Structures are given as C-alpha cells and as structure tokens.
Image (cartoon, helix red, strand yellow):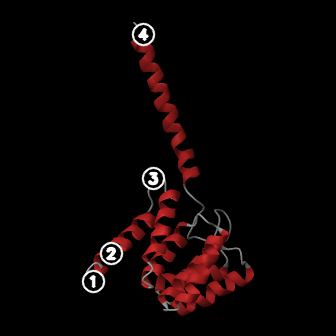
Amino acid sequence: MREPGVKRALMRSMVLFALALPGWAALAAPNDNDSGSSAGVAEDADFAAGRKAFEAGDWQAMTGAFNKVVAKDPGNANAHNFLGYAYRKSGKLDLAFKHYEEALRIDPRHRGAHEYIGETYLLTNNLAKAEEHLKALDGICTFGCAEYSDLKKAVAEYKRNNAKS
C-alpha cells in the first residue's frame, strides 16, 4: 500500500506551500505605494507634514509639503501621487494629471496613482481613460487590491449615473 507515501508527499507539499506564502506575498505586493518611506528609514519631515495634512484634509498644506518633497527628491513617485491627490481635491485637475502622470512615469505599477488618475479621468468625463487605468490595475493586482476595487466601483457608479442620457 502506497497510500501513506502519497499522504506524506501531499503533506510535504502543503507545508512547503505554506512556508512559501509569506515570500510570495512579498513578491506580489508592490513597493509601499502610499508611505513614501522605506522600512527602517526615517521619514522626511516634509513628507510627514504632507501626510498629516492629508489626514486633516488640508489640501493647501498638503501641496506645500509635497512640493518641498519633490523639490528635494523629484523621483519620489509617492510624493507626486500625493500632490496629484491634493490638486484634484483642490479642483486643479491639470496639476493633478501632471503629478499622477509623473508618479506613473517613475513607477508604472504605482497602484494609488492608477486609481486616482482613473478617478480624475471620470471627473473629466473620460471613461475610456479611466477604464485603461482599471485594466492596468487588474494586471498589477493579481489577487485583487483596494485600489482596483475602488476604481472599479467608481467606474460602475459613473456608468450608472451617466446611463440616464
């Protein structure tokens, strides 16, 4: 009877799979798309001020802080994403697009920038461009992510609201 050997092989496979899960999760997760700091590295004071302004909904303070960050570190995709968000919330959509596009130029897999630029396209009635970013997130978020879900919901709501024509 070889059944115990099959069970043992199956158990070994399950154990190896379970041990590999944390490593796979690390590979599947993109860089921290919203923190702007790496683990173990002190956060820039201006970045911290920008995050505090974000949490308070103070878009003017947020733009001031994140403009300082990108002046020091123009390659910071997270800072550009936050700037895009602050400009969008301030109604300055041209500046929002500029910073979201820069974040995506720096990091084409930046989930937050894809979500937020998609939402901004919906504000300008450009459903096709919003759906392009939804499709990009679908490819980036292999097992789903909040950014994909949020943009998908916004696109569905946009379609519902605009189907009444």
Report the residue that reaches farthest toward the right: 72
Task: Write the residue at 66% across / 63% down.
Answer: 40
Mark 2–mark 1 Cα distance, whole angstroms, equals: 11 Å
Badge 3 local density, few (<14 within 10 Å), some, or many (20+)?
A: few
Residue 143 badge: 3
Q: Where is residue 38 in the image (x, y as percent from the top left)?
A: 65, 65
| Sequence-first disc among 4 and 3 | 4
Label 3 residue SS: loop
Residue, disc 1:
165
Q: Vertical placement of 120 versus 29: above or below?
A: below
Q: Tag 1: residue type? A: Ser
Mark 3–mark 1 Cα distance, whole angstroms, equals: 35 Å
Mark 4–mark 3 Cα distance, whole angstroms, equals: 36 Å
Residue 2 badge: 4
Report the residue that reaches farthest toward the left: 164
Q: Which of 49 and 111 is in front in this view?
A: 111
Q: Nearer the viewer, residue 54 or 98?
A: 98
Q: Tag 3: residue type? A: Phe
Q: Vertical placement of 97 versus 91: above or below?
A: above
| Sequence-first disc among 3 and 1 | 3
Mark 1–mark 4 Cα distance, whole angstroms, equals: 68 Å
Mark 2–mark 3 Cα distance, whole angstroms, equals: 25 Å
Which of labels 4 and 3 is toward the front? 3
